[in-house]
Structure formats: structure tokens, C-alpha cells
Image (cartoon, rainbow, N blue to C red):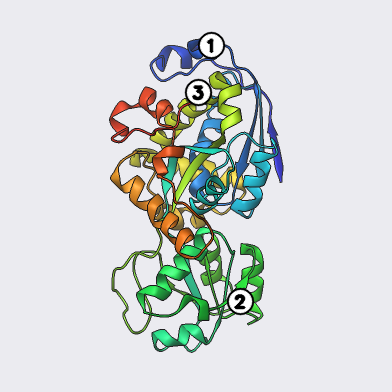
Amino acid sequence: MRRSHLPLVLLLVLALTLPALAVSAQEGGELEQTKLRLGFGLDPVYAPHIIAIEKGWLAEAGFEKIETATFVSGAAAGEALLAGEIDLWTPGTVPPISMRHNGVPVVIVGTNTLAYIEKFVARTDAGLEKPEDLLTIKIGLTEGSTASATMENLAEHYDLDPLKLQIVNLPAPEQMTALINNDIQAFVVWNPWPYLAEINKDVDAEILHNGTVSNFPWDAGEEFQISFTRSVWVMSEDFIRKNPNTARALMLTLYRAQDYVADPENREEVVTLISEYLDQPVEQNEALWDDYSFENIFDENYIRDLQKYTDFLYESGRIEDPQDPMSYTYTGFMAEHNPDNVVIEGTWEP
């Protein structure tokens, strides 16, 4: 799915009422490119992007054409970024960590939202009565994604050997079909798929772990975190270095939109706008909204979350020579927008 948005006319009254918030091309120099291509998904993670588009703030920043491409997996979007097909990637943290450790020059420029919500969903007839039963069922997930790390964290919490799990590698939409057909008995995935599974009339399914709290029958209500996922903003090194004014204008606009999305007073408006944009029921996104925290602070928790998945990738043999997360993190854009949000500075420089 691709969308193209024509230039939006900036009303004089907007310039007069919001001068402190406006981001113009002139403030940071002329944009190197005025066409913008964004990678998209299907859930509220993309609220800041949508708000920036729908309110005309990206046009206000000098972008004359905005295209979006929707991907169902972070890996596919990452490939599009490296191919120059999109300018901004918004994945969970595992794909960019893996790519960076394999020599791919990508840089994290911010946290879009905290999303500790890879959820374990199972059919109610899966026969899960004790932790060891997790080894007897087929579990769908996208290999190499944050779901892989989440599932291994769950297994290790129950002292199960992750290598004995019966994993079926499937993209999210196919996981739903496989669950309905009983080809798999559970899956681990991000929104909106767990919600859609629970309301689907063709399968009786339930969320047995929401990323931070268990609902398994043997320890229902116990709090333990298995997801350490952040939705992050990622650019290629080349894009930032060749288009410094474009990258700056894009990020300052997204930070502005993120602040707007994070304000509880704007919740109803934001949920309505993103539902219209994504052509989804408002009640669906309202039900999912509390899963997200639109925070963008570079601090000890940022390092903790990235280090958790770095350790997972290293211990599972997917990467070698673990890197400091701050070595491929650029905090310069945020330092300009809100210096208080840069508790720890990234060491990557353009």
C-alpha cells in the first residue's frame, strides 16, 4: 500500500499562533530533498508520523511530497531503507541492532514509542496447563524479529530450553491464518494481531502474556517482563550525511508530533485521525492505545532495552563482538529539540 500526499498550504494564522513550534527549511538551511518516503506499519506506533502528515507539519517544514510504504515486517522495511526506497524506518529494536552488528550502516535517531507488547496468544484448546506444555505446541513468530527475543525470554523465565521450542517462521498475517486452521497453536506478535485474534469469530484465542504480565493458568497475574521493545526511528548513515538539513527537519517535525501525541488531552483527536488514516475502526485503536508510551529519552533505560536484545542476539550466535548501543545512536537532533531528553549522549556523529 502506498499513499501520496500533495503539498499542504500553510495558513498564515498557523504561522502566527505557533511560531515557536514551527520547523522551517530556512531555519536549518535549504532541504536537500523535498520528497519524503516513510516506512509504515498497521498499528498506533505510527501516530506521530500520521499527525505530522495530517496536520501539515511536514509540509510546513518544506516537504512537498510525502509517500508512505506499508510493510508487515521490520526486515523488509530495513531492506527498503538500505535500497534507498524509504528515508525513515520505524522498527522494533532487534532488526537494526542485528544489521548494525553485521556491518550495515544504520543509525538510531530516537525512540518513537515504548512498546513492551509482543504478546503471547494461544488457542484456548492448546492444552497449556504447566510451563513444560509450551514445548508441545507449535508457536508462530517472525524469526529474527523482536518476537524471537520475547519468546526466548519467556522460555528462559520458565527454565525451558529455547532450542526445544517448536517455532514456525511466519509473517504476522499468516500467523493469524495458521492459528485459525490449528496449524499453530500459539503465536508471539505485536499489535494489532493479538487484538484481532481475540475478537476473531473463527478461533477461540486469548492473550496469555502481554509483554510484562502473565495470564498463564499457573501464574496468572505475575509481573515479569519478556519484551524490551522500543519502536525506534532509524536512518542510514549516508542519508544523514548527504541530507543533513532534510534529516534535521524531518526529525524535529516528528519530535513535535510525538509531543502532541503524548499529551493525554489530544488522545481522542489522535486516535480518530490515525484510525481514519489507517482505515481501521476507532474502537480497535482505542483498545490498543494504552499499550504505548510515546517517550523519547536517551537514558539508562534506553541502554538497558537495547542491551537486552544485543545480549539475546550474541548469546544465540546471531552476532559477534557486541557493540555499545550508544555507538550507533545519534542524539544531536533531540539535543536541539529538548536537551533535557538527552541524559546520555550518543557517540555516533555525522
Q: Earlier in the sequence, mark 3 or mark 2?
A: 2
Nearer to me, 266 or 39:
39
Residue 215, compared with residue 255, is above or below; it is below
Residue type (three-letter) at the residue carrying disc 2: Leu
Of circles 3 and 2, the one toward us is: 3
Residue at 64% across, 63% down: 171
Q: Which mark is residue 29?
A: 1
Kind of residue indicated by mark 3:
Arg
- Figure check: 317 above or below 342: below
Would residue 232 be visible to someone looking at this image? yes
The residue at which mark 2 appears reads as 179
Residue at horizontal 64%, vertical 40%?
81
Residue 48's x, y, as percent? Answer: 48, 38
Q: Is residue 131 left or right of residue 36?
A: left
Residue at label 3? 248
Disc 3 from disc 2: Cα separation: 43 Å
Among the 4 quarters of the image, the one containing residue 160: bottom left
Are the two marked residues, 3 and 2, in contact with CB atoms closer than 8 angstroms? Answer: no
Distance between the Cα atoms at labels 1 and 3?
A: 10 Å
Which numbered marker is on residue 255? none
Secondary structure of the residue carrying numbered label 2? helix
Callout 3 secondary element = helix
Point out the tag, 2 or 1, that comes first from the N-terminus. Answer: 1
